[in-house]
Amino acid sequence: MIKQKILANWNFIEREYKIESSNLFGMLGGLLIGGIGGVGIAPEIPKFIATDNRSKFYEEICRYCDSKNFSETELYNRAKISRAVFSNIRSMSRKDYLPSKSTAIRICLALELSKDQSQKLLEILGYHLSDSLIVDKVIAWCMENRCFDINDIDDAIHEQTGKFFLTRD
């Protein structure tokens, strides 16, 4: 399918712009279509996607819960997330589920993680605390100053931005 699209687009470009196939396209086309050693890129994409590490998010949560003697129930209650959402997090390896950034941050706050620990946990899901977003700066400041009350943090975010981030999904 990818090979056909690339060839169709190239044929259109050749026809519209009266360009002859060059050695450069031959080399690039060969890499894109045939790949290195004739394998092609299409078979490689599923392998790359299969390296998804999101299931490690739950594993890390469990590790932190164990180290802090929290039960899962305590954690999701402290994080102010529903049992259903936590169940989705638990089964992320079998489902195509990605918790929101706000949910992931609430878990970090409930576990009383440092900013660095939170960054590592968030990165598993493709999130991070940015130095350029006011919401993220407020959260990072609170983590650095060991303020973990979700309601207080969300009030501080509201004072700075006029919006709630953690308690109003």
Image (cartoon, rainbow, N blue to C red):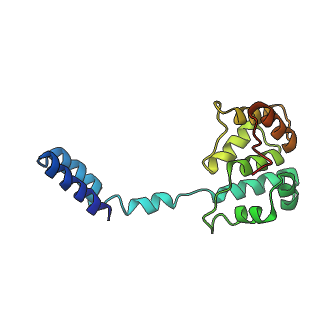
Q: Nearer the viewer, residue 43 or 95?
A: 95
Extreme front residue here?
Answer: 162
Q: Is residue 156 left or right of residue 41?
A: right
Q: Is residue 44 above or below residue 159?
A: below
Q: Nearer the viewer, residue 78 or 43?
A: 78
Residue 92 drawn at (x, y percent): 66, 63
Residue 45 drawn at (x, y percent): 42, 59
Q: Is residue 45 above or below residue 95?
A: above
Q: Is residue 137 left or right of residue 53?
A: right
Residue 34 drawn at (x, y percent): 26, 59
Query: In percent of the image, x 53 and y 58: which residue is there?
Result: 51
Query: In percent of the image, x 18 and y 44: which residue is there?
Result: 24
Q: Is residue 149 visible?
A: no
Residue 33 drawn at (x, y percent): 27, 58
Q: Is residue 78 visible?
A: yes
- Name which quarter of the figure residue 66 lies in: bottom right
State how many labels appear: 0
Q: Is residue 133 above or below residue 92?
A: above
Q: Is residue 16 left or right of residue 57?
A: left
Figure quadrant of the N terminus: bottom left
- Name which quarter of the figure residue 86 lies in: bottom right
Q: Is residue 2 left or right of residue 117?
A: left
Query: In percent of the image, x 64 and y 60: which residue is there?
Result: 55
Q: Nearer the viewer, residue 66 or 49?
A: 49
